[in-house]
Image (cartoon, rainbow, N blue to C red):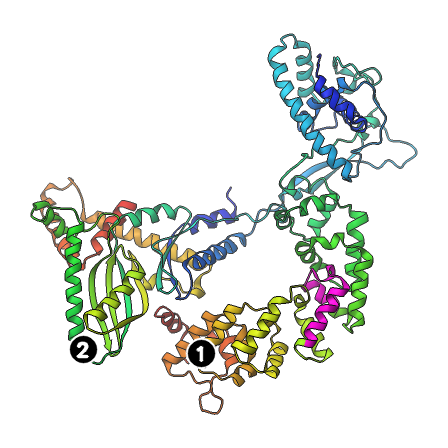
Amino acid sequence: MKTSKPALQTCAQEEVTMASSCAQLCLKCRSLLCSKTVATTWQHSTQVRHCRTVTPVITKVLNGSSFFSGNHRTSPASQRWKQQMFCYSELSVKHLATEAKEDKFKEELSRADVVAYKSPLLPVNEIQMPLDLDAAAEFSALEEITHEEAVSISVPAAIPPSSTSLRDYVDKSETLSKLVQLGVNLWKLEQRPNVGTMLLKLDFNMDVAPRLLFLKHIGVEESHIGYIITHNPFILTEDLESLQARVNYLKSKKFSSETVASMVSRAPYLLNFSVKRLDNRLGFYQQQLNLSASNTRNIIARLPRLLCGSLEPVKENLKVCEIELGFKENEIQHIALTVPKVLTANKRKLTQLFDFIHNTMKVPHHLITKFPQVLNTKYLRVRERHLFLEFLGKAQYDPDLPNYISLDRLVSLPDEIFCTELALATLEDFYLFQKTL
Amino acid sequence: MAAPAVRMFRRVEGLFCVYKPSGVHWKLVRDNIETKLLKGLNAAPSQPCPQEVRFLAQPGGDAEAPKGLTLSVASVPALSKHPLVTGPEFQYLQVGVGHRLDAFSSGVLVLAVGNGNKILNDLYRTRITRDYTLEGESTYGHITQDKLDRVLAMLQGANQKSLLMYSNVDMRSQEAYEMAVQGLLGPDGKSAPILTGLRCIRFEPPNFTIEVQCLNETQKYLRKVVHEIGLELRSTAVCKGVRRTRDGPFTLQDALTRHHWTASDIMQAIQQYKSSKKNKNYSRSKVKEPGLHPLEENTTDSQQNETNVEAVAAGGSRSQTLLSQRCF
């Protein structure tokens, strides 16, 4: 079949390396037609057609290093190649369509096609492949190769050049398969822009494995590694020395190794921040809350994401507590030490909750400070429980008076125990009451 | 063969109602329900990862190379079908909301999942009434129960008049009479809000509670009604709470509270609604037997008339039964 595509010719001649790899690919594809090991020939039919159109352009078959042999390393060159591949195949597909229409005397070829596709099980020698290609000088399809050679021909992977999902690549990529086996949620990661491409470009042995070993070395459990990478895939591109330096810094601030491991598990972005930034934050919390070093360590160990987020919302929350809610400094200290989550709470919700507790339930400041968990609950929960107790006449939160209901039990007990012990009513009554609110 | 999750999804399609707490936007309620349903559906046991057969070349390390093809066959799981790669089976659910409730009000909110959305559309195109409970508070001491009742009666009269006006039927015709007998008088589609029933349930000055049955209303209009009642009483009245107790065939009894917003409870509520619809249809089809028993026709007609008179008195139930006939 004569093909004359000057456009393709110029494209190919621009990049000789591309051509060599194409040639290699074509060589393998041609031999594909002859070999009988490939059950996936059908899948490769598009690539094969592509080869048949490109080969006439290549005048000389170069011996290049094998591109698709075994390891699925994808370097930047291959990415470019893939993009080129995309446009090549487009052109080839278009060309084939026109060819099929115009060329009438292709019976020989079509017969051969049929023979080739229908009976891939025929032994090597019998197939006649009259592929009339220009560059068929050295590697003829009619050459006999031994069985061992036939077996050792590796099939190029049918990877689409570009895709919106990682599932097309996961079976062929060692990195991705190993990540899935570790429990990384690839589907969640591919929603984020550019993360998928970054993961594909990583090499398991050179990039991923050293960092996984590092995490294991600092004490992170294997079951948590999937979680960490799902939330922070960029830990796989951080410099190993920087990671080690940050861990050393934390240890120098007297965080024990187990604490550091638990902090990294719960705040996956922690080790991506520079030593300077971590230092800055630790200093901020110590100064603003006027806490001792051990107390600061305590808070940070329990809520490590305090070190990861921005400091502005925390500053605002502290100001809200001081000015709007009217807590004194030592009260704020105590609240932050008992329930550090208040520091990162939503300002509006915090104010709404406090307004209800202080003005509707008539609970004074010192009682709230004594039970800071009430500031951590959902507004609707506190509201329905308080109104139920008020309806029953049991809403009494002053410890000096009889029949006192403690605030922490009010908010932390599950529904059944709340009904039976505090409200002395049935759960159904509580649900019925909720429908009257 | 449908996966367990798909079978569960078939059971979740339908209509149900929840109790919306006050202070929460209806969209948050809808999103919350969607999230909980998705969680329940995706928790169903998934299909195991399909295996793929791969041929791996034997690593030929021997000096005497074996003749013939030595390929080892390995059956490995195809990771491209693993849930961590494909994502959860259900990612979005179509949950539709019936007549909306604004953030300040609470009460029965009808939701529909999947195929139920079509039924929801039909539901809201027919003329169904809704029941509300309005909590009002007035500040002046000269208001008594009978003054309030008088004002309410006057309001109800005005609304009845507007009902007749919006029904687009000549009041002096036989057609109008027959429609009135059957309780079919009323606006078709969009119109001004009409209160078909007003009643004072509780009066403890300064608070009072009114029960309202209405058509085409908004909660803002209902609050305005309380304000107008206050004006009629020559004082002020403020609406402290709007609570929807019934929306068409859905009552407070069937409404799910926040703690019951889980996939299993919702499925139960939907099954309950479906079975109650079937029972209603079955009992109705027994009453109407067209043409089979000509002797009994007259008696069945008279029976129907009796039920119709009751329906007129009730005010809303006839339209509900019409609705059930149309939809199922």
Prevailing secondary structure of the magenta residues: helix
Q: Residue at x 13, y 51 (%)?
A: B180
* Tag 2 secondary structure: loop
Neighbour tally class for label 1: few under 14, some 14-19, many 20 plus, Cα within 10 Å: few
- The quarter of the picture where the N terminus of chain A appears is top right
Q: Which amino acid does the dot numbered 2 rest on?
A: Thr
Residue extending farthest right: B63
Q: Residue at x 76, y 24 (%)?
A: A12
Chain for mark 1?
A: A
Pointer 1 residue? A420
- The quarter of the picture where the C terminus of chain A appears is bottom left
Label number found at residue B148: none
**Residue B121: percent from the left, percent from the top?**
33, 47
Whole-Å distance between the Cαs marked 1 and 2? Answer: 41 Å
Pointer 2 residue? B144
Nearer-the-camera pick, A244 or A226: A244
* Tag 1 secondary structure: helix
Q: Residue at x 28, y 47 (%)?
A: B125
**Residue B88: percent from the left, percent from the top?**
56, 49
Neighbour tally class for label 2: few under 14, some 14-19, many 20 plus, Cα within 10 Å: some
- A389 is higher (above) or lower (below) than B245: below
Nearer-the-camera pick, A303 or A224: A303
Question: In front: mark 1 or mark 2?
Answer: 2
Q: Please give left or right for residue A198 compared with residue A427 in the image.
A: right
Q: Which amino acid does the dot numbered 1 rest on?
A: Thr
**Residue A402: percent from the left, percent from the top?**
45, 91
Can residue A175 be seen here? yes
**Residue B98: percent from the left, percent from the top?**
35, 53
Looking at the rendering, the stretch of residues picked out in magenta corresponds to A260-287
Q: Quadrant of residue A86?
A: top right
Nearer-the-camera pick, B59 or B244: B244
Q: Is residue A280 magenta?
A: yes
